[in-house]
Amino acid sequence: MKIVTQYRAFLFILSFIEGASVMSAELIGAKMLAPYFGSSLYVWATVMAVTLGGLALGYFTGGFFAEKNRNNNFLFYIVLAAAIFTAFMPLSSQLILFITANLPLLTSIIVSTILFLMPPVFLMGMVSPLIIERLSDDTNNAGKISGSIYAISTLGGIIATFAMGFFIIPNFGLIKPAYYTGLCLAILPLIAIVNYPKKAVAVLLCFVLLGSYFNKESIANSDIKILYQKEGILGQIMVVDYPVYEAQSSPSYYIRMMLFNRVIQAINNKHDSVNTYFSYVPLMVSESVNQVKSGNVLLLGLGGGCVANELIKNNFEVDVVELDERVVVAAKAYFELNPKVNLFLDDARRYINNAKKKYDLVIFDVFKGEENPAHIITQESLEAVKKSLNNGGMIVLNGYGFRSGHRSDGIKAIVKTIQNAGFYTNVLSSAAKEEESNLLVFAKKNKFNTKKMGFIFSENEIAAAPILTDDQPILELLNKEAVAAWRTAYIATAIKDFNRRNIPLFN
């Protein structure tokens, strides 16, 4: 006999929780991939494809078993299995990421995501057809029941997306939300299966105690000092003191680093006055001083505040636009951000579109994880920046250091777009090796010479490059090989080094 009256509300609530759990698992899964693979187009496309594929397979399988299986508890066993897979995603993902790390980058992303995200999503996909079958007592109300269940499930997903993205993940990390998502998903099935309140409470208590053991705060037994670590919808941010050894067993000194998804975004090496920062920082600042001398600067992207601090030292008035509040907190607390810097917590493009102030220098030092955000560097964006520049003003853009092959497709498109917006460009490299350098694109309305010998991409070199526009923001696609090269190098070096030194992937 189908469950209609007695458990209708019970099953509607279960559908709501299942929908919320699907979106929670998707967001948590994407953020678990970030320390290894970043948050590039590859990663998000894979996460969404695996989630949708898992749901589709689950819908089909659930529909098949809805007709074949008449066990009243089958639905609840499926939900309980999904809860267990969800709760232990932090453990399974770390093991799987470690095992697949040596595969080619794209293969590793796809295989890892399938192995730890597909099982819970597939099982949750089975839930809606099974609930619909139990609630539909005849063919006349099947459509109404189906619509109600999918609407309630989707509503749960919407609420969970906002809650996870804006509150839960930023405040509680990834491990606890994954576990307690699984716990919430397990409560109703346990009550239904056990069919006795005291037994259900006992089973739930065991679940909580087991989870408290696996989710206990771990103190990294490492020579790397973690000063700050926080998860968020934009990825993982860390500030560490990294030890440097000079022939003795204890560290000689430490280099302070800011990392975003395990990619080093800023360094401060107080032990070395010549190489205090990344090599692009003094090059960018010195050439900016040489060209502009002084005035108002708009710096898009804060990082550790190294560029902002150096500009302040050279008597510029500096406005910084930074989207991620965690970066501001870290720069102030751990990188001695100069209090004279004017901070605006905003999206760079939104600030550009609404800017009323005139600037002598606009610097694009903004990255979304490991790549320049596509919506910030377009023809329309540059034309808006052009209106905000004083006469003789200059634009500087920090990008990948690749000058040849398909790895340079992104930077060539950027240069062509800047030129098409009415600027002359000179490009400087911060290091001899492409893999270790940044390319700095300097642009002015009139022809100019840089103090250090630079280069200009020839017309032939950029002839095939597209103009980046708002309706064709394809920079991520053009940068795909550059992103893959950078991320592969980081997995082989920095990420493996942090793993070897017992630094957890996420908290």
Image: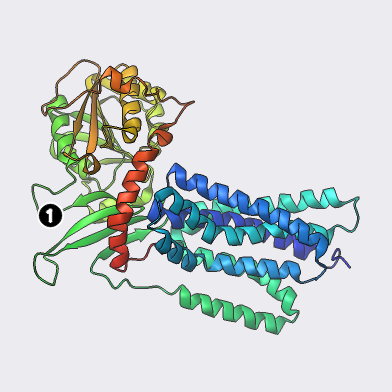
Which amino acid type is shown beneath numbered disc 1?
A: Lys
Tell me: residue 420, above or below residue 308: above
Secondary-structure class at tag 1: loop
Q: Quadrant of the C terminus?
A: bottom left
Q: How far across and how far down the image is residue 394, in percent? A: 23, 24
Q: Nearer the viewer, residue 123 or 387?
A: 123
Q: Quadrant of the N terminus?
A: bottom right
Q: Nearer the viewer, residue 27 or 310?
A: 27
Answer yes or no: is residue 268 visible. Answer: yes
Q: Residues within 10 Å of mark 1 (few under 14, many from 20)?
A: some
Q: Quadrant of residue 197?
A: bottom right
- Residue in the image at 40% along x and 55% along y: 103
Answer left or right for 44 relative to 196.
left
Numbered circles on residues, count: 1
Answer left or right for 137 relative to 121.
right
Answer left or right for 231 relative to 503.
right
Q: How far across and how far down the image is residue 317, in percent? A: 21, 34
Q: How far across and how far down the image is residue 401, in percent? A: 25, 37
Residue wearing tag 1? 270
Q: Residue furthest front?
A: 103
- Residue in the image at 43% along x and 75% along y: 216
The colour scheme used here is: rainbow
Q: How far across and how far down the image is residue 211, in percent? A: 52, 75
Q: Quadrant of residue 462?
A: top left
